[in-house]
Image (spheres, helix red, strand yellow):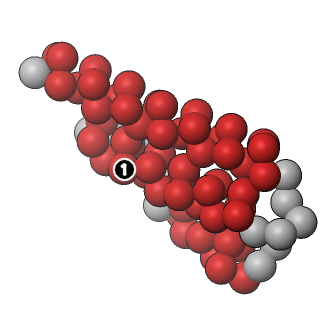
């Protein structure tokens, strides 16, 4: 795994939202996670299919959080 990906994983972990964070903040974190997994999928020597699946799941979770927050308002 290259340095950029490792650094992003570290930053993603350190910046994980707290339990009472607003849904929009949590959704933004999941979008960033999806971006990271798309980077991994594009890198050579990685499980592209698995990384893309993780990216899709993260984007879906972000979408559901924002949608639920919009419906609650």
User: At x 27% / y 25%, what residue is drawn?
Assistant: 67
Q: Quadrant of residue 39?
A: bottom right
Answer yes or no: is residue 13 visible. no
Q: In this orientation, which residue lies closer to the viewer: 65 or 11?
A: 65
User: At x 18% / y 17%, what residue is drawn?
Assistant: 71
Which residue reaches farthest top?
71
Which residue reaches farthest right?
45
User: At x 27% / y 42%, what residue is drawn?
Assistant: 24
Does residue 70 appear left or right of residue 28 in this picture?
left
User: At x 64% / y 55%, what residue is drawn?
Assistant: 37
Does residue 48 appear left or right of residue 67 in this picture?
right
Does residue 13 appear left or right of residue 68 in this picture?
right
Does 26 sit above or below residue 7?
above
Which x, y percent locates residue 56? Answer: 57, 38
**Residue matched to label 1:** 28
Which residue reaches farthest bottom?
3
Secondary structure under the numbered disc 1 in the rendered image: helix
Which x, y percent locates residue 31? Answer: 44, 49
Does 19 sit above or below residue 2?
above
Q: In this orientation, which residue lies closer to the viewer: 41 or 68?
A: 41
Q: In this orientation, which residue lies closer to the viewer: 10 or 58?
A: 58
Does 2 sit above or below residue 35?
below
Image quadrant where one finds the C terminus? top left
Which x, y percent locates residue 45? Answer: 89, 66
Q: Quadrant of residue 2?
A: bottom right
Image quadrant where one finds the N terminus? bottom right
Which x, y percent locates residue 40? Answer: 71, 62
Local packing at callout 1 (Cα closer than 10 Å; few below 14, some 14-19, many 20+) is some
Total count of labels: 1
């Amino acid at each position: 795994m290259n340095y950029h990906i490792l650094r992003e994983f570290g930053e993603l972990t350190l910046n994980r939202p707290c339990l009472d964070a607003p849904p929009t903040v949590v959704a933004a974190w999941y979008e960033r996670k999806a971006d990271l997994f798309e980077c991994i999928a594009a890198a050579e020597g990685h499980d592209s299919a698995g990384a893309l699946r993780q990216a899709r799941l993260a984007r879906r979770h972000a979408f559901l959080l924002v949608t639920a927050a919009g419906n609650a308002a």
